[in-house]
Image (cartoon, rainbow, N blue to C red):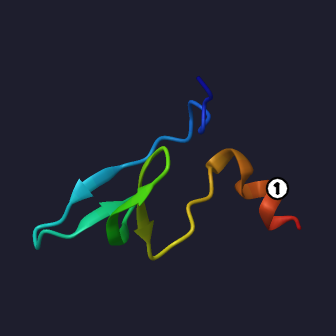
């Protein structure tokens, strides 16, 4: 199996008081999109692993 995140790149997934699902504080805008190997959840934000954020800022 392949690892998609480093050990330090944990995601916080929770449901708000109003029933909105959030991933690291960002709203899931379209859940359960069928894909060939599972499902995808569309967010209103691009998730960038903490291990890459410094490298991306320096581009």
Looking at the image, residue 38 sits to the left or right of residue 54; the answer is left
Callout 1 environment at 10 Å: few (<14), some (14 to 19), or many (20+)?
few
34 to the left or right of 15: right
Q: In the structure shown, which secondary structural element does the residue marked by tag 1 occupy?
A: helix
Residue 57, image x and y in percent?
79, 66
Residue depicted at x 77% and y 56%:
54
Residue located 89% across and 67% down the image: 59
Relative height, residue 3 to residue 59 (above, below) = above
Residue displayed at 79% across by 62% down = 56
- Indicate whether 38 appears above or below 47: above
Q: Is residue 37 left or right of residue 51?
A: left
Q: Nearer the viewer, residue 58 or 46?
A: 46
> Which image quadrant for residue 29?
bottom left
Q: Name the residue at 63% across, 49% down.
A: 50
Q: In this figure, which residue is indicated by the disc labeled 1?
A: 55
Residue 37: image location, x then y, percent: 48, 44
């Amino acid at each position: 199996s392949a690892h998609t995140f480093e050990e330090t790149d944990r995601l916080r997934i929770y449901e708000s008081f109003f029933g909105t699902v959030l991933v690291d504080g960002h709203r899931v805008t379209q859940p359960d999109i069928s894909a060939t190997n599972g499902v995808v959840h569309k967010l209103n934000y691009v998730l960038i692993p903490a291990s890459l954020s410094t490298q991306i800022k320096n581009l």
